Image (cartoon, rainbow, N blue to C red):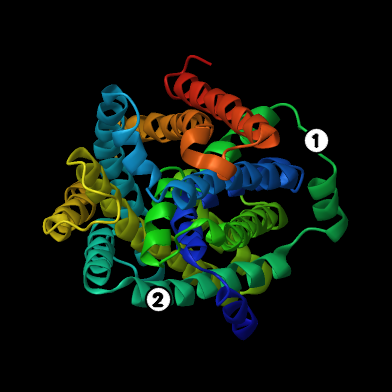
Amino acid sequence: MFAAITRHLRSFGPGLVLAAAGIGAGDIVTSSLAGIKFGSALIWAVVITVFLKYVLTEAVARWQVATGETLVYAWVSRLPKWVTIYFGCYLVLWTFLVGASLSSACGLAGTSLFGGSVGVWGAVHSALAAILVACNRYEQFQRVTKVLVAVMAASVLVCAIVSAPPLTEIVRGLVIPSIPMPGGPAAILSLLGGLGGSVTMACYGMWMRDAGWTGGDRLPTVRNDLALAYAFTGLFGIAIMVIAAGVHAKGAAGAQIAIELATRLESVGGPALRWIFLVGFWATVFTATLSVWHGVPKIYVELLRAWRRLPDSEASPHDRGIYLVSLAYLAGPPVIMLWFKQPVVLVVTFAIAGAFFVPFLAATLLYLNNRRDLMGEFATKRWGNITLVLCLVIFLVVCVREIFTTFGWA
C-alpha cells in the first residue's frame, strides 16, 4: 500500500507542497467535528470545498503563466497602495498566529507519541523545520515532503478502512447533498473555512517558480497538478470524517480531538491502530509546518521585491537575508505562546484573521484575471467569473460567520 501511494505521489509537482501546507490540525479538527456530529452526511461539502479552493488556486496560477509575475507581486505593482498596506499588515499578524498554531499542533503530536511537554516538543519541531527549510533546496525539500505525505496518507487510509461506517452511508453522504439540522449549516461553513488552507494558496506561485514552471504552455500541467493536490486534500478530509463517524469520538475540542480519535481507534483495532493514527497525525502537522515554513517567507521576499519594483524574475542580493529573517520570525517568537497555553486573545485573533484572506484573494482575482490587456487568451471566461463570484460570496459569508461566532454575536 505504501509503495502504491508513493508511486502516485511521483506525479505531483508543486501541488504536493500546496496540499501538505493546506492540510494541518485545522483540517483534522473541522472534518472530525463534522463526522462526530453528522456521520458521513457532509462528505459532499468536502467535495464542494476543495472544488472552490481549486478554482481560486487555478486563477492564481493562470495569472502567473499569463503575465510572468506572481499574484503577490501584482498586489503591490498593479493595485492601489492601500492593498499593499492591508496585505502586509495582515501577513505579519497571520504569520505569527499560524506559527503559534502549527508549533502547538506539533507539540501535541510529539507529546502524544513520546510524552513530555507540548511546549518543548513544539519548540523542537519549529526549530527542526526551520533548519531543514533553510538548508535544503527545493528539489530536496520536495522529496522529503513526498515521504511524509506518503506516511500520513497511508496511516489515515488504514485507519479509515478499519473504522469506516457502512459503505452505503459513505456513498449517500457523497452523492446526496443534505443539510442536517440543527448545526448543519455551521458545520458546512466550518469545512469551507478550515479545509485546504488560505494564504498557502498564494504560495503556489512561488513553488511554481521554484519548479521552473513558466509560460502559457504549462497551464495544462498546472491544472493537472492542482487537480491531484485538491483531490488528495478532499480524500484526506473525507477519510478523517469517516474515521470520526466510525468510532463515534466525543468529548474533545481543538487539536486534542486527534488524541480522542486515537483513543477510540484503539478500542476498534487495538494499540497498533492507535499508534498508526498518531504517526499519521504527527506526519500531517509536521509536513504542514515544513511547507508553511518553506513558502510563507517567500511571500515576504516577493512583497519587498515588488515594493522596490525589481522584476519578478530578478533575484536581489538581499533576498536570502529577507527570507531567513522572515523564517526566523515565523519559527521563533510564536513558540513563546506555547508556554501561555494559547490565551483567549490568540485563539480569537487567529480565528478572525484566518477568515479574512480568501474573500480578499477572490476579489483581487476577479479584477486582475479579467484584465484582458494583461491576460490575453488566459483571461477569465464567463463560467470562471461565475465560480469566482461564488467563491467571493461564500467565503464572505464564512468570514462574517466567523466574526459573529467568535464574539458570541450569533
Q: Identify the mark at residue 11; answer none if there is no mark.
A: none
Q: Position of residue 58 (x, y in %)?
A: 56, 48
> Going 68% across and 67% down the picture, which residue do you hit?
268
Q: Is residue 197 left or right of residue 106?
A: right
Residue type at numbered disc 2:
Val
Can you identify the residue that label 1 sits on? 178
**For mark 2, does the 10 Å Cα neighbourhood hold few (<14), some (14 to 19), or many (20 or more) residues?**
some
**Looking at the image, how many numbered discs can be counted on the residues?**
2
> Going 29% across and 49% down the picture, which residue do you hit?
99
Q: Secondary structure beneath disc 2?
A: helix
Q: Position of residue 76 (x, y in %)?
A: 29, 35
Can you identify the residue that label 2 sits on? 144
In the rendered image, the quadrant that contains the N terminus is bottom right
Q: Is residue 338 visible?
A: no
Q: Is residue 338 left or right of residue 254?
A: left
Residue type at numbered disc 1:
Ser
